[in-house]
Structure formats: C-alpha cells, structure tokens
Amino acid sequence: MNAIINLFVNGLSTGVLIFLLASGLTLIFGLMSVLNFAHGSFFVWGAFVGLWLYDLTNHFFVALIGAVLVGMLIGWLVERILIQPVYGNHIRQLLVTLGGMLVLIECIRIFWGSNPLRANMPDWLEGSFQFGGVILIKYRLFILVVGFLIYLLLWIILKKTTIGIMIRAGVDNREAVQALGINIKTVFSFVFLFGAGMAALGGFLLAPYSGIIFADMGMQYAILAFIVVIIGGLGSIPGAAIASIIVGLAGAFTAFYIPDLSLSINMLLLIFILLLKPTGILGEKGRA
C-alpha cells in the first residue's frame, strides 16, 4: 500500500511538471492553432538559464523569475520573427518552428556545452516528510503547489478577465474582434509570450527534480506535451491538467510494475483515448 501511495505522489508531481509545459502549448497550439515545435526549446532555455542564475545568485526565486523572463523574451522573438508571417499556415509553421528549435538548441550548446549539467535543489526544499511508511519528498510537494497555482491563474485569466474574453473571441472569430477595434495581433502575441514563459518555468522546475539537464531534452518533453494537449482536448486547460495527471501516473506505475512498457505507454494512452473520444477528454465542450 505504501508503495502505491509513493508511486501516486511521484506520478502526480511528474504530471504537474508536464502540465506546466503543456499549459503553454494548450494556449499556443490548442487555442490559437499555432503548430509550434519550438515550444520544447523554451523549456530547455528555462532550465539552463534558471540553473545558471541559481549558481550565480544562490537565490531560487531570482533564478525562477529570470528563467521565466528569458523564456518570454525568446518566445516574443520567435513569435515576431517566425510565427507572425505564417499565421494560418500549419505546414510553414511546422517548418519554421522546427528550424527555430534547432537553432535555439544549438545556442544552448554554444553557451553551456554539449555535456549534461548537474542541477541541485535549494536546501529548504531538500529532504522529505514521513508518515508511517509513506515518504513525501518536499520538492515534489512544492511542484504540486506551483502546478495548482498556475492552473488557477490560467483559469482566472481565461474565464474572469477581459483579456481572456478577447483571446477566446479572437480564436472563434478573428475578423469580428478586429472590427471592434481590438488589436488581435497584440492579444495573440501576449498569449504566445505567456505560453513560452510557462514552458520556461516548467524547465526550471524540472532541473532540480531530475537532477540533470541536457540540450536535447526539449524535444522529448515537447512530444509529451503535444500528446497531453491532444489527449486533453485542443484548447482546454482543464483537459490538459487531467491528461497531464493521467500521463504522469501511467508513467510512474508502468515504470515500476511493467518497465518494458514504460516507453510506449504514452502513445498507447493517446490511441486508446482518441478511439474512445476523438476530440480528446474535454475537447470542444470542455474548451477553456
């Protein structure tokens, strides 16, 4: 029983990390319909810049804020230079963002080299709580709290603010929103920038969680995020949250009980859920 509880907590915290990456992609890909393969590179830049700042300042939250700001800056540049000329054209989006991802990953190698880097967590997040035979690692509990706060923030922005109304209206009918005098380009730029910041945050939080970071991890996690966004239903923040938790739990339990299946479990989940519901868990009706 204790092993199951530990696996559940581990899977839940992994799912939250996936959600932080997938939440930005849900906005960019699911809501705005921009096929952005450079999203994983925002994640990697967040991890490397955050780790560099943490080594420099020895202050966790300064590093966290710096990682998010750099992720947003890179996202802004990618949106302005690569995405704006190809809005509405998925094939060109795929090509230019793949190219952008390769350039951004090579820049990581130029600045930090090709070797993996070790990432330590702050002293105040080291250790664990023990209840009977159940061990709860502090850092994983911290990730759960951050993930919940990010989910709440996204929900409030999309449901309760004017910018959220403009985003949803702009996705449904771009011309009508522009006719009201709203600069939809600026609104979409804001969404893209925010999504890039979420990816960078996820990368920074992953670094101490995994203990090691490397330049190529962006593609691995970007594929995972695309799977989550599709399983959850395009454009649905609650769907992405549910899908992230399902993927995280499935990965934790499969790796422990059926390790041979751990690499393919995500694709099996994707196929199984899409066979049951082609629009994803909260597709269409559950759109945020």
Image (spheres, rainbow, N blue to C red):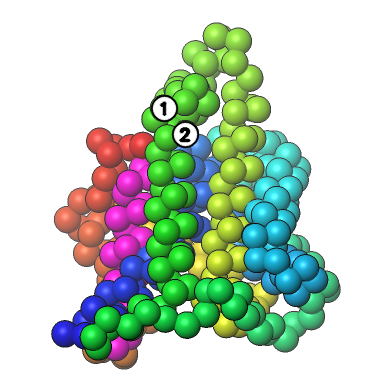
Quick one: 237 or 83, which is closer to the camera? 237
Q: Is residue 243 above or below residue 150?
A: below
Question: For the residue marked with disc 1, what is the amino acid?
Answer: Lys
Quick one: 83 or 216, which is closer to the camera? 216
Query: From the viewer's perspective, is 81 left or right of 61?
Result: right
Quick one: 190 or 92, which is closer to the camera? 190
Q: Magenta region, mostly helix, strand or loop?
A: helix
In reply to whether residue 249 is colored magenta, the answer given is yes
Q: Which residues are magenta?
A: 235-256
Residue placed furthest toward the right: 110
Considering the numbered disc 2 on the image, is that residue within a helix, a strand or a loop?
A: helix
Residue 243 at x, y percent in the picture: 32, 58
Residue 178 at x, y percent in the picture: 57, 15
Quarter holding the C terminus is top left
Neighbour tally class for label 1: few under 14, some 14-19, many 20 plus, Cα within 10 Å? few
Residue at 40%, 62% in the rendered image = 144
Question: For the residue marked with disc 2, what is the amino acid?
Answer: Ile
Residue at 64%, 27% in the rendered image = 185
Quarter holding the N terminus is bottom left
Between marks 2 and 1, how big is the CA–CA gap?
6 Å
Residue 57 at x, y percent in the picture: 77, 68
* Residue 71 in sight: no
* Residue 123 in sight: yes
Find out whether the residues at labels 2 and 1 contact each other: C-beta distance under 8 Å: yes
Q: Which residue is mark 1?
A: 160
Query: From the viewer's perspective, is 195 left or right of 7?
Result: right
Considering the numbered disc 1 on the image, is that residue within a helix, a strand or a loop?
A: helix
Residue 12 at x, y percent in the picture: 33, 68
Q: Which residue is mark 2?
A: 157
